[in-house]
Amino acid sequence: MTTPLLEARSITKSFQLGRTEIPVLRGVDLTIGRGETVALLGTSGAGKSTLLHLLGLLDRPNDGSISFDDQRVDDLSTKERARLRHRRIGFVFQFYHLIPELDALRNVQLGALMDVGLWEWLGNRGAIKARAAALLEEVGLTDRARHRPAELSGGERQRVAIARALIAEPELILADEPTGNLDSETAEGILDLLFRINRERGIAFLLVTHDPALARRCDRIVRMRDGRVVDDGLATTAPATEGAAPPA
């Protein structure tokens, strides 16, 4: 493995439903190296999305620790976690989460607002706009920059979301079913783009997926079942069937 970038140790997470406590994560260990691509596989309810939210500092674990670049981060204040998240972690979701009233260029620019804050954003609008335009060119959408999400195809919306995730120059991108809403041909193009970004920029990726073919393109495959990691191995040696049990 490359130098560790993100490390989770023995993390647990439960949710309260009335008087009942529902355990979702039951002592998860996971390490992501710098520039590494990791696929996270598991059936619905395995805890993948909950784990992604914790690793992205959107929520705190009940127990255990999360470290980013050798600094413990799960116990930081809300403001400190938000600052780290906006500057060093990018997100790509299955349903894009674009602002429908804004065109593609402004949706990408909005990603910088979360990073630098309103006043710095206003003072550097020209540079931020130019960077957003360059990112749209990188993802192949220069001619769609002035189109709103409703005027874009699913694949184009996901490319806008990827450009938005890149504007803060993150070291890690967390992607939750990034091709789950797309047909196979469009999905292949999105995956080619993500892996090209990984190669050219050295950004680490954690990809939540149900697709074993996508997983095999990654450096490692991590499988979850019932809130636990049950297998963690190189993609070239890991079994192809999703949810497969680890060797006895």
Image (cartoon, grey):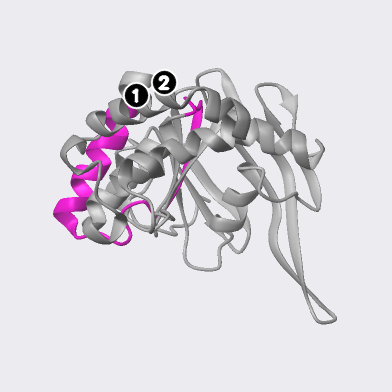
Q: Vertical placement of 131 versus 42: above or below?
A: above
Give the camera-side residue of 131 and 234: 131
Mark 2 in CB contact with mark 1 (< 8 angstroms)? yes
Q: Which mark is residue 70?
A: none
According to the image, label 1 marks what residue?
130
> Which residues lie in the magenta part?
168-197
- Whether residue 173 is visible here, answered yes or no, is no
Q: What amino acid is found at the position of numbered circle 2 in the picture?
A: Ala
Residue 144 lies, in percent from the top left, at: 20, 44
Mark 2–mark 1 distance (CA, rounded to whole Å) = 5 Å
Give the camera-side residue of 105 and 125: 125
Residue 230 lies, in percent from the top left, at: 56, 52
Q: What amino acid is found at the position of numbered circle 1 in the picture?
A: Ala
Residue 22 lies, in percent from the top left, at: 74, 72
Magenta span includes 181: yes
Q: Quadrant of residue 123?
A: top right
Residue farthest to the front, as pictured: 123
Residue at x-position 41% and y-position 53%:
98
According to the image, label 2 marks what residue?
127
Q: Secondary structure at mark 2?
A: helix
